[in-house]
Amino acid sequence: MDSANSTSLSSTAYDIVSIEEDCSTSVDVDHETRCWGCGLRVLVSPYASSVFKCGWCGAITKQNALKCENQCFKWRRLRDLCFVSVVLLFMLFFICGGIWAIYPITFSISFFGGVFHLIVAVILSLSTLSTFCLAAFRPAGAPPTIPWGSYPTVGKGGLENYTFCHYCSRPKSPRTHHCRSCGMCILDMDHHCPFIGNCVGATNHQGFILFLMSAVISMIYVIIMSSYSALHISPPLNHSGVSISKRTPTCLPVYC
């Protein structure tokens, strides 16, 4: 009787131990993953979210991150090319048309005024075109290339707050954003401007601000010079007939 009880108790204890081992094994398997930054194994709590940070390299992993297919990339590039062409033609038309339309009027009023207008117009035109080309055709800025993927290569905190870009398949710094229109990661990205066909980032942000300032100053100068020229070529209002009729007495014949 005692031997039977001891046998049943031992079998029950064995079953409990085996169940606990199975549960612990399943927990370890379900919540063990690898860090993309250093390649080390990371044990994630079952109550943690899908985003976790590696304790060694500091890289942030998003487990449920999905890569959206960029099917409209060619259409976006075509749109940017059209916008850039229209802006360039618009600026060239107004620069050439404005200079040659106001040029004879300003020189007919004053020689020094015409020379001053010509110098200012050339300076503003060159500054606007050069800053536009600097903002449009200069790369916006790529993130720095750093080692990643293996434990001996990546040191302690070497990828602090870095994330992984699934489009470029490379590390992405906290100040970097992936632009779907340009198809690359941009450092210090502000926004994607279709009028320059480029992103505004770390390397061309200053050129973009200078282009905006030069364009605004040029528009103000064009408005001032156009108004000045329109006032000088418009015919003056002649009220001489009215004034003469008021000052000249009318003579009426008197018959006796």
Image (cartoon, grey):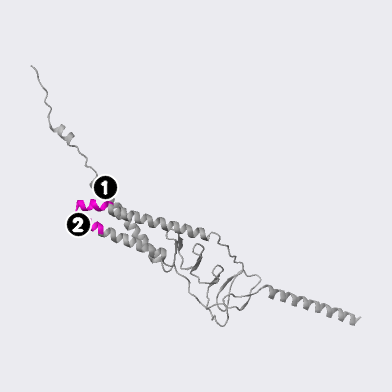
Q: Which residues are magenta?
A: 101-118
Q: Position of residue 162 (x, y in %)?
A: 53, 73
> Which amino acid lies under the numbered mark 1 shown in the image of this protein?
Ala
Which of pointers 2 and 1 lies earlier in the amino acid sequence? Answer: 2
Q: Which residue is mark 2?
A: 112
**Residue found at the very far left of the displayed protein:** 256
Residue 66's place in the image compared with 156, above or below, is above
Secondary structure type for disc 1:
helix
Of residues 200 and 47, the one nearer the viewer is 200
Residue 118, given in percent of the width and then of the height, sits at 25, 58
Using the image as rendered, state which of residue 114 and residue 62 is in the foreground.
114
Q: Residues within 10 Å of mark 2 (few under 14, many from 20)?
A: few
Residue at (32% x, 62% y) in the render: 126
The residue tagged with tag 2: helix, strand or loop?
helix
* Residue at the farthest top position: 256
Quarter of the rendering occupied by the N terminus: bottom right
**Which residue corresponds to mark 1?**
230
